[in-house]
Amino acid sequence: MKLIIQIPCKDEEEHLPATLADLPRTVPGFDTVETLVIDDGSTDRTIEVARANGVNHIVKLTNNKGLAAGFQAGLDAALKLGADVVVNTDADNQYQGADIPRLVAPILAGNADMVIGDRQVETIEHFSPLKKSLQKLGSWVVRQASETTVPDTTSGFRAYNREAALQMQVVSKFTYTLETIIQAGKLLVAVDHVPIRTNPKTRESRLFPSMGAYVRRNSISIFRIYAQYEPLKVFWSAGAVMGVISLAVWLRFLVSWIDGQGAGHVQSLILGAVLFMAAMLLFALGVIGDLLAAQRTLSQRTFERVRRIELALGIPPSHYEPGAPQSKDREPGGTDDREALEV
Ligand SMILES: Nc1nc2c(ncn2[C@@H]2O[C@H](COP(=O)(O)OP(=O)(O)O)[C@@H](O)[C@H]2O)c(=O)[nH]1
Ligand SMILES: [Mg+2]
């Protein structure tokens, strides 16, 4: 069994050494533990630092494509490098490497395909009340859309087994955390969660430069993902609201008309008609969205099969570079040689 720990990085030369040093060299249940750094167009020395610290594999994207794209590229590479389980962690040492055995335990026990580390957000001191509230709201929406019970949906500390990794196809540009949970809920992926610990904050979030950006981007992401996966609920609810308003406006006209003052309320008649047309449009958008959602499921199944074929054919990962030079000579199953490379 091979475990690959992947770390998405954008300009992480400063914190990467501590993050790597914190990762376990062996994990019960696995013969091999390897590391994979996804360098997403860093302009600092991330790659050199990764190599100097003995990282086994590197996926180097030529320019910055965003965390979701980097995550997907990493997952793809990890599968092609023969991972049985892929753990994702952040480069800023937010999560504790020592919790990895706990994270993979439900997968090893055969109870889950994907496990999310629950940071127990309520207890994190450096999260502001606004961030916590948004976190809770976002997590609630994602739980509704995904029909899962994941408490901490934006946690980046996760484990995927091969089946889960094969099925994931992230299309969001910005966030993979929410979308992968929703996909898992809809696909043949069993999701579980375990409590994990976090380290004190090492630096400000790169993903969200300000609280405003956090609120804006997360709200948009949540809405888009929800509308993509539950178009009938979103558009038909909006259509129903519009329809009820139009009926109320028409009712007003009807009452005046019965009173013999219909001519003076033609505006209500027109407004009601416009609102009614808007309602119909929203209903139609819901139907179109629903057809597209079904199509997406079919495409996703096709992608999954293409991936299986690629793996069977031994197609190499894209943008791949071997990591630390000595790692090429590693004995299969040996993990100790990496220790010698530590600087
Ligand atoms: N691939 C990729 N990773 C990124 C990018 N921005 C941040 N990351 C990585 O995503 C992880 C989380 O970023 P961080 O700034 O800690 O955001 P936080 O989750 O809000 O704390 C870290 O490993 C970063 O290096 C990006 O543009 N592309
Ligand atoms: Mg962070």
Image (tube, rainbow, N blue to C red):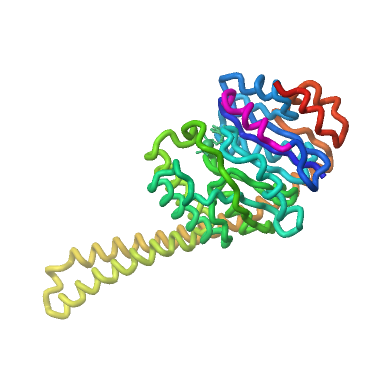
Q: Which residues are magenta?
A: 12-24
Tell me if residue 30 comes above or below residue 182 in the rendering.
above
Residue 46 placement (x, y as % from top left):
62, 23
Please state, as top left, top right, bottom left or bottom right, where the N terminus lies in the image.
top right
Residue 37 placement (x, y as % from top left):
67, 31
How many discs mark residues in the rendered view?
0
Viewer-proximal residue, 18 or 321? 18
Tell me if residue 234 comes above or below residue 207 in the rendering.
below
Please state, as top left, top right, bottom left or bottom right, where the C terminus lies in the image.
top right
Q: Residue at x 51, y 61 (%)?
A: 144
Q: Quadrant of residue 51?
A: top right
Q: Residue furthest bottom?
A: 258
Q: Residue at x 15, y 75 (%)?
A: 256
Tell me if residue 133 comes above or below residue 78 in the rendering.
below
Q: Is residue 329 visible?
A: yes
Viewer-proximal residue, 215 or 246? 215
Viewer-proximal residue, 265 or 321? 321
Q: Residue at x 29, y 71 (%)?
A: 247
106 left or right of 95 in image: right
Q: Quadrant of residue 57?
A: top right
